[in-house]
Amino acid sequence: MDQNFSVSSVITPNFPNQSSDVVGHPTPEKSVSKTEWNGSSDSELPETSSPSVISDLSWSVPQQGTNSLSVEQSKESCTRHAVGKFSDLESPWAMAEELRRIECEEQIIGKPYEQQLEEVLEEKRRRTAELYWNALLNQWKKWTISEFFFFLMQIDNKCFGGYFSSADKLEAKWLEACGRKFKGEDLSKIDREDLAAMGITNKEHRKKLAVNIHELCKRGN
């Protein structure tokens, strides 16, 4: 069954206007922008549509090249942007990103930021105390009676607190048992009999303190 329809040709580039009286440059034929005809559904397109198709192909080549160039420029731009973000960790962007990460962890862990901060500070205090304690032990030869008393209070949850309630009481007991003023270097000479004379009546306590003092004297030599 015959049908009436129209076909719009692909837009072709405009040629410059030229006069037909110029030798060697005849005026080009005008492209058909719209062709109407009657025919069946299996009718072929008129021959005048071919230049438009060719022209469209010739214009599509540089357009594809432009798109490819644009993609490469976009990739390069994204790469520069990403490198710029992570190259400076002290930048405001880096600090904001770190804050965002902490906030995300806060939601996951379920702890407020203040609590996390307090835990970090507590860990730092613990490490500082441990460093101080090790340094103190290494200097045992230079101890005063106060440092020796502090050492005793760290053993077995202050089990020697019942014998010596203060550094002054410890010094008095030491002077009574050893007959001389306390010096840290004298700890290497003390024995269980001296500890008994200082008022440590429990045998197991004397043994425990003797072992701790013996291990102490191995340090800093």
Image: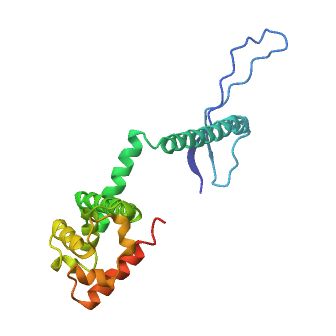
Measured as percent of width and height from the top left, residue 5 is found at 56, 45
- Which is more toward the observer, 16 or 7? 16
Q: Quadrant of residue 179?
A: bottom left
- Which is more toward the observer, 22 or 70? 70
Measured as percent of width and height from the top left, residue 29 is found at 72, 24
Left/right of residue 63 with respect to residue 161 in the rendered view: right
* Residue 186 versus residue 117 in the image, above or below: below
Q: Residue drawn at (24%, 61%), measured in percent from left and top?
A: 115
Left/right of residue 162 with respect to residue 136 in the rendered view: left
Measured as percent of width and height from the top left, residue 56 is found at 68, 37
Residue positioned most to the right: 24
Measured as percent of width and height from the top left, residue 52 is found at 69, 35
Left/right of residue 71 with respect to residue 132 in the rendered view: right
Q: Quadrant of residue 14?
A: top right
- Total numbered labels: 0
Q: How is the image coloured?
A: rainbow
Q: Residue drawn at (20%, 81%), measured in percent from left and top?
A: 199
Q: Residue drawn at (76%, 12%), measured in percent from left and top?
A: 20
Left/right of residue 80 with respect to residue 205 in the rendered view: right
Q: Residue drawn at (27%, 81%), measured in percent from left and top?
A: 195
- Which is more toward the observer, 189 or 59? 189
Residue positioned most to the bottom: 203
